[in-house]
Amino acid sequence: MAAAHPASSTSDDRLSRENLLVISVLLIASFVVILNETVMSIAIPVLQEDLDVPPSVGQWLTTAFMLTMAVVIPLTGFLIQRAGTRVLFVVAMSAFTVGTVIAFAAPGFEVLLVARVIQAVGTAIMLPLLMTTVMTIVPEHRRGVMMGNISVVIAVAPALGPTVSGFILDHFGWRWVFGFVGPIAAVALVIGAVLVRPVGQTISTPIDYLSVPLTVLGFGGLVYGLAGIGEAAEGDAPVPLWIPFTVGGLGLVAFVVRQIMLQRDDRALLDLRVFRSRVFSVSIVAMIVGMAVMLGTFIVVPYFGQTVLGLTPFTTGLLTLPGGLLMGLAGPIVGRIYDLRGPRVLVIPGALLASAGVWMLSTIDPSTTVWWLLSANALLCVGLAALFTPLMTLALGSVEPKLYSHGSAVLGTLQQVAGAIGTALFITIMTVVSTNQMDAGVEAAEAVSNGVARVFVVAGVLSLVLLALVIFIRRPAAVGDETVDLEPAPEDVTAAP
């Protein structure tokens, strides 16, 4: 095992200037690539018309992106340990930048689809790389603040995406959705290539080639099936849903069995020993529920705005912006509170606020005002801000340091699956309810409104599940290489940041 650049800090546990630069560059790069994920949500209808492709084909710009993410993210735990921080950063941002340039110049749909896949490869690597780096070089009592900064990236970038996309579409055309992102990505690549240095340890273990196709079949099949549920509800599914779900289920079972065998010798592509920590497991499940609700809401609320309220793409994009900005502003504050007081003062009020926002959305109808949508979405986002930072910090802080990269990969993978689950569930409920009501003679706007309201009743139930989960959250106390579940002692919760 070769040692890379040491995770140095000053004698009083403050981060060195070099490590702060590394984290800053990774934060900026992660913001850019995650922003790119949601700019397409409003651009796809415009692309379909301009490129003359039907909706069932145009949706592949999102589906292929999600599939690639689902396949690549499980590999990142191994890749981070094998290649190191700097090499993997350059590879990830190079792939993202090249994909963005190709997308900008794409002469047709096929080339654009390939470009989206290349972009997704870079996107899949960045967030696990950022979280692993933070866990490696940041002292434990300052991780809350740093994870708060990561929650800014996770929250603000998806919320800002539709707004940026709507503005660009209204004024410049779809190509400039990529033209706007490309130069920023290129600058981040150049700066990162100079400033980012290796942190932690690298390994020389060879990759297990059997695990790679199992990853493709397992996670790819599952996400493909989830992405196709909405199309199936409309009768447009290209293949019967049982096929991808069967392939995905069998692939996942085989993948898990293979990893359990390999991790005995520390050769797993995705080490599942992270789930031995109860704190990690409970926090991850809570994150899945929260992410599903958030990303499903970010899809359904703009759809309601355009379809029922008749808003323009730009105005529709603004619906999720205030909530996302509030979420981002709250992230560092939540991180400081976590470092000082522990998780419970945050996660329970956060779950209550998120639940209140979702139940507000369950009352919408064709007469609902934009202000009601903004207020409910803002309440939901503030609540999730109080949840995500503690949950991410708790989850990764509860595993052994040598498993940080695998914990980050598990978190990133399941966040992607959660997004697919939330989007598929919400779109399917909305489609089935609105279609049945229109068949019964209800006007289109009212039928869609009723479908969206039903979506948020289901989301409200999920928010109650989330509340039940966070009641069991405790901060783990490290004991050697093991962790135990403990309520923070008075001296722990008053540690200086």
Image (spheres, grey):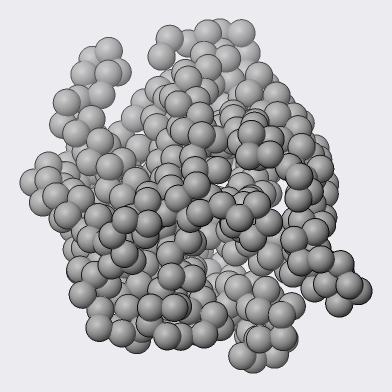
Image vertical order of residue 408 relative to residue 48, above or below: above
Image vertical order of residue 113 relative to residue 120, above or below: below
Quadrant housing the C terminus: top left
* Left or right of 6, for residue 207: right
* Left or right of 15, for residue 324: right
Q: Image point 34% across, 86% down: which residue?
A: 110
Image vertical order of residue 239 relative to residue 42, above or below: below
Q: Position of residue 132 (x, y in %)?
A: 37, 45
Q: Position of residue 98 (x, y in %)?
A: 20, 69
Q: Image point 77% across, 56% down: which residue?
A: 449
**In the image shown, does 469 or 41 lie closer to the viewer?**
41
**In the image shown, does 181 or 168 lie closer to the viewer?**
168
Q: Position of residue 171 (x, y in %)?
A: 31, 56
Quadrant housing the N terminus: bottom left
Q: Position of residue 10 (x, y in %)?
A: 21, 19
For the question of whether residue 472 can be seen, the reply is no
Residue furthest to the left in view is: 194
Residue furthest to the bottom in view is: 239
For the question of whether residue 362 can be seen, the reply is yes
Q: Image point 69% across, 35% down: which residue?
A: 372
